[in-house]
């Protein structure tokens, strides 16, 4: 397993901002981060489209040095709408962005 720093992963994600805004008609996009239980960490995007906010993320495993490696290639969409369930199982971020 190859571990990368949090900064390396975020820099890679940030390079996609403008192409995703243009391709998927997104109003705004930023980085999403959330500390999970034990050694889990979630990184992805916070995207706003048609006035609604979505968190689109994938799970990582964090080592003792704070470096991260992907656990599996599966993306999840979380909505800010409390009654809406998370949608899981997207094989890539573009599939998730098409869904919103």
Image (cartoon, rainbow, N blue to C red):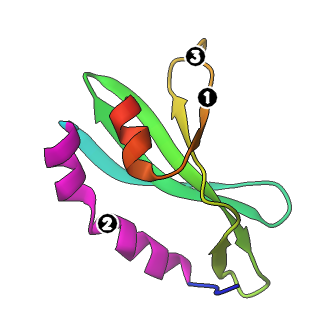
The image position of residue 9, as x and y in percent, is 47, 74
Main SS, magenta region, reads: helix
Mark toward the viewer: 1 or 2: 1
The image position of residue 92, as x and y in percent, is 47, 52
Is 96 situated above or below 99? below
**Res. 32 visible in picture:** no
Q: Residues within 10 Å of mark 1 (few under 14, many from 20)?
A: some
The image position of residue 21, as x and y in percent, is 19, 46
Of residue 20 and residue 94, the one placed in the foreground of this image is 94
Question: Residue at point 58% right, 54% down?
Answer: 58
- The residue labelled by disc 1 is 86
Check contact, mark 1 vs mark 2: CB within 8 A: no
Instruction: Identify the secondary structure beneath mark 1.
Output: loop
Query: Between marks 3 and 2, how big is the CA–CA gap?
Result: 27 Å
Q: Earlier in the sequence, mark 3 or mark 2?
A: 2
The quarter of the displayed image where residue 35 is located: bottom right
Q: Which residues are magenta?
A: 5-24
Q: Earlier in the sequence, mark 1 or mark 2?
A: 2
Question: Residue at point 59% right, 17% down?
Answer: 82
- The residue labelled by disc 2 is 14
Q: Residues within 10 Å of mark 2 (few under 14, many from 20)?
A: some
């Amino acid at each position: 397993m190859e571990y990368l720093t949090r900064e390396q992963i975020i820099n890679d994600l940030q390079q996609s901002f403008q192409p995703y805004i243009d391709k998927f008609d997104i109003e705004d996009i930023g980085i999403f981060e959330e500390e999970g239980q034990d050694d889990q960490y979630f990184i992805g995007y916070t995207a706003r489209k048609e006035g609604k906010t979505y968190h689109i993320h994938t799970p990582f495993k964090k080592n003792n040095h704070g470096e991260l490696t992907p656990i599996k290639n599966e993306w999840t969409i979380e909505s800010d709408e409390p009654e809406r369930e998370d949608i899981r199982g997207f094989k890539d971020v573009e599939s998730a962005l098409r869904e919103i």
